[in-house]
Image (spheres, rainbow, N blue to C red):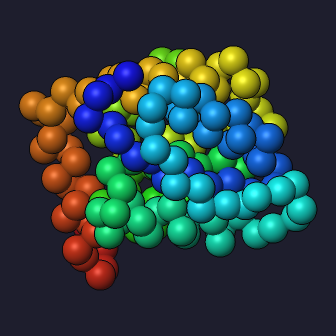
Amino acid sequence: MNQTQTAIIIGCDHAAYPLKETVKAFLLKQGIEVEDAGTHSEVSVDYPDYGIKVAAAISRGDFSRGILLCGSGIGMSMVANRFPHVRAALCTDLLAAIMCRKHNDANILVMGGRMTGEGLALEMVRAWLETDFEGGRHQGRLDKFDRLSNQSTFCE
């Protein structure tokens, strides 16, 4: 594991609660502190409530990385990416988990609890944590993301 990664915020909806608990246990076993933003059961909830908590914490700089899970991962990725400086990547395979770090410096890993098995999810989490951002030409692309966050209208 990346030794500089000391704390992660994690959140999910009811559909991904079992996978969140598996991922949380894995992180704790790796010595990574986990802030659990909920939900804390399989009782139906609105996924945006938990996506907002995690994405806001990343956007404010309270955490450098987070993990979000919902049934498909689609809703969580949509809500998270509305926040400035959040780069949430919905990953469905190992290569995506690696590349979203290498090229996009993804700071939130998003997975679908109904779409991703435990084994693959843990492999993706491990790869996402261990993969560093390459910088270089990719940094210029991320700078364009940040400029978008500062604009109120888009005419081009």
For the point 38% across and 60% down, the residue is: 58
Q: Nearer the viewer, residue 95 or 35?
A: 35
For the point 64% across and 34% down, the residue is: 25
Position of residue 115 measured from the top left corner of the image (x, y, whole percent): 76, 33
Report whether 95 appears left or right of 19.
Answer: left
Vertical order, 49 against 32 (above or below): below
Quarter holding the N terminus is top left
For the point 13% across and 44% down, the residue is: 140
Vertical order, 77 against 72 (above or below): below
For the point 44% across and 21% down, the residue is: 127
Q: Nearer the viewer, residue 147 or 34?
A: 34
Vertical order, 152 against 104 (above or below): below
Q: Is residue 92 visible?
A: no
Quarter holding the C terminus is bottom left
Report whether 40 appears left or right of 91.
Answer: right
Position of residue 31 measured from the top left corner of the image (x, y, whole percent): 45, 32
